[in-house]
Image (tube, rainbow, N blue to C red):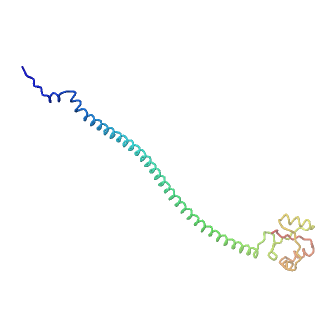
Amino acid sequence: MEEVYVNGEFSQSHNPVALTNNYMGPRSSKRSFSSAVILSLGLLNIFLLVGLITLSVYLHGAATSVSATSSNISSMTEDENHLKANLSTVINKLSSMTEERDLLHTRLTEKTRELERLQSLSKQKKTCASGWRMFSCSCYFLSEKTGSWDEGRSDCRDRGADLVVIDSSEEQMSTSNLTLQELWTLELIPCHPFCLPKE
C-alpha cells in the first residue's frame, strides 16, 4: 500500500482555509483599489463626457449666434452701401435740379424782360380794332349816332370802352386826322361821343 507521506508544509499550503487567509487578503485590497480606480476613471469619463456635451452645445449656440450676427452685419453693410448709393443719387439729382432751377430762373428773367420790352413796344406802336381810330397812342371810336350823353355812354360801355371828352389841346390837335366832314360834325354837335377803351 501506498504510503502517504505527509509533509507538514504541504498540508498547510494546501489547506483551503490557510489559502483563503493568505491569498485573499492582499488580493482583496488590490481588487478594491482597482475597483476604486476604475470607478474614479469611469466617473471622470462621465464628467468629461457631460462637460464635452455641454461645451459642444454652448459652442454650437455661440457659433449660431456668431453666424446670425455676421449675417446681420453683412445685411447692414449691404443696406449701408445701398443707402450711400441712394444718397449719391439724391445728391446728383439735387444738383441737377438746382442747375435746372437756376436755368429756369434765368429764362424767366429773360422772358420777363422780353415781355416788358414787348409791352413797351406795344404801347409805342398800338394798333386799333376795326372801326376805331388812333389818336396820340390811344384808340378812339367816333360814333355815327348822335344822342344824349347817357346814350353815348351806354354805347361806349357796350363796346367795352368809356365815354371821354377831349379837352386837352394835344388831343384836339391829334384829331386833325379826321376828315373835314367829321370835324364839322364834331363842331356842330358837341355831345358827339368818343369812346376810349378800358385798360
**How far from the left and from the top, in percent, is residue 64?**
44, 48
**How far from the left and from the top, in percent, is residue 178?**
84, 76
Tell me if 70 is positioned left or right of 138 in this view. Answer: left
Above/below status of 173 relative to 107: below
Tell me if 169 is positioned left or right of 72 in this view. Answer: right
Above/below status of 113 relative to 72: below
**How far from the left and from the top, in percent, is residue 77?**
49, 57
Q: Determine the image quadrant of residue 96.
A: bottom right
Question: In this figure, what is the number of numbered marks?
Answer: 0
Above/below status of 79 relative to 123: above
- Which residue is nearer to you in this view: 89 or 15? 15
Q: Residue furthest left?
A: 1
- Which residue is nearer to you in this view: 148 or 20? 20
Q: Determine the image quadrant of residue 37.
A: top left
Q: Residue furthest front?
A: 8
Above/below status of 69 relative to 18: below
- Which residue is nearer to you in this view: 156 or 176? 156
**How far from the left and from the top, in percent, is residue 101?**
62, 67
Which residue sits at x=56%, y=62%?
A: 90
- Which residue is nearer to you in this view: 88 or 56? 56
